[in-house]
Image (spheres, grey):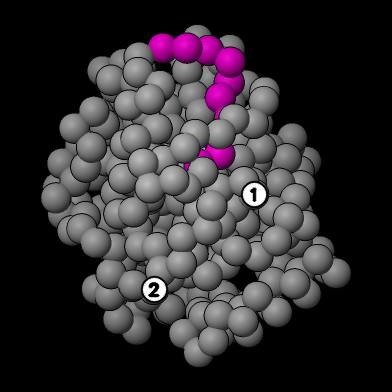
């Protein structure tokens, strides 16, 4: 798998990675916060083995993708629209992990999109009010407080991650039984290694991503009519369960796949094949 670059109409660069197949139908992978495009390696390989063309891409500020300060969620969908046109893709499904979830939802507005799958996705900050924070672990509460106050404070916080256990930072100090099971699987290590790679390459992604999380999305998720599968862990302390329930309630064609015993990353790893198969089912329906 080789990193590739696409020049957008405004001159910015968009970096992406494919699984080596070519097709007019595809699955597009929207990464979580801090996740490099290589963090999808095991998923890209799985889709290739299933004969399904798949690609991951870096949002603005990640690796070789040009920063775009003030980016909002819908901006990413516009970038993807250009990329899929250049690749000749006429039908696709979006998968979004964590912070990538809302961007996958936005891309569901594209007339070529036939479905959306999210895993631990945020609901709109502007609509949830204080319920946005309910049940979050302290580390995440601190991150949002920094982002609202001064983005440089958040950058400094992320820089401290490089000196600690990234898995512990994301999941909390005490791993559940399900987390420990997930930590033994290849995808867990691939994901955390990709986050470390992102942090080693710079910090432009911090301002870009958090502006999209805390500002209005630029569209109404109620307007996304394609079938949408909302995967949510009941023990998620990064994106608590009310986010998944809000999306399910407010999106007209959404269904909730709640796994009560799973955390934020636990559901992504422990249910990875089921999640990928749910996307393939939408693509081939």
Q: Quadrant of residue 140?
A: bottom right
- Decide whether residue 16 is among the magenta residues: yes
Q: Secondary structure at mark 1?
A: loop
- What segment carries the magenta color? 14-23
Left or right: 180 in relation to 54: right
Relative to 91, is 268 on the left or the right? Answer: right
Which of 253 and 153 lies nearest the eye of the viewer?
153
Residue most toward the front? Answer: 11
**Residue ranking furthest to the bottom:** 149
Which mark is on residue 63? 1
Q: Is residue 138 left or right of residue 172?
A: left
Residue located at (32% from left, 26% from top): 85
- Local crowd size for mark 2, using a 10 Å CA cut-off: few (<14), some (14–19), many (≥20): some
Disc with the residue nearer the chain's start (2 vs 1): 1
- Residue 61 included in the magenta stretch of the image: no
Q: Where does residue 176 sit, x and y in percent of width and height? A: 68, 59
Q: Which residue is mark 2?
A: 214
The N terminus lies in which quarter of the figure?
top right
Image coordinates of residue 154 in percent, x first then y, are 61, 79
């Amino acid at each position: 798998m080789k990193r590739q670059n696409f020049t957008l109409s405004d001159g910015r660069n968009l970096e992406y990675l494919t699984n080596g197949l070519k097709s007019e139908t595809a699955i597009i992978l929207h990464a979580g916060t801090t996740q490099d495009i290589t963090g999808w390696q095991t998923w890209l390989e799985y889709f290739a083995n299933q004969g399904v063309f798949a690609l991951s891409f870096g949002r603005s500020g990640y690796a070789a993708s040009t920063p775009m300060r003030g980016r909002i969620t819908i901006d990413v969908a516009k970038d993807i629209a250009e990329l899929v046109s250049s690749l000749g893709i006429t039908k696709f499904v979006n998968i979004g992990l964590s912070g990538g979830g809302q961007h996958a939802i936005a891309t569901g507005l594209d007339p070529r999109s036939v479905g959306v799958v999210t895993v631990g996705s945020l609901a709109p900050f502007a609509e949830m009010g204080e319920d946005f924070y309910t049940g979050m672990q302290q580390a995440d509460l601190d991150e949002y407080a920094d982002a609202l106050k001064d983005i440089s404070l958040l950058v400094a916080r992320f820089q401290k991650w490089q000196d600690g256990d990234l898995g512990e930072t994301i999941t909390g100090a005490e791993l559940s039984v399900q987390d420990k099971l997930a930590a033994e699987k290849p995808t867990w290590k691939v994901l955390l290694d990709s986050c470390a790679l992102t942090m080693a390459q710079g910090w432009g992604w911090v301002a870009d991503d958090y502006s999209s999380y805390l500002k209005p999305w630029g569209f109404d998720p109620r307007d996304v009519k394609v079938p949408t599968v909302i995967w949510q862990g009941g023990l998620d302390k990064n994106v608590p369960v009310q986010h998944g329930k809000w999306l399910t309630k407010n999106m007209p064609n959404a269904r909730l796949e709640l796994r009560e015993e799973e955390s934020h990353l636990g559901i992504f790893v422990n249910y990875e094949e089921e999640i990928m198969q749910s996307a393939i089912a939408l693509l081939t329906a």
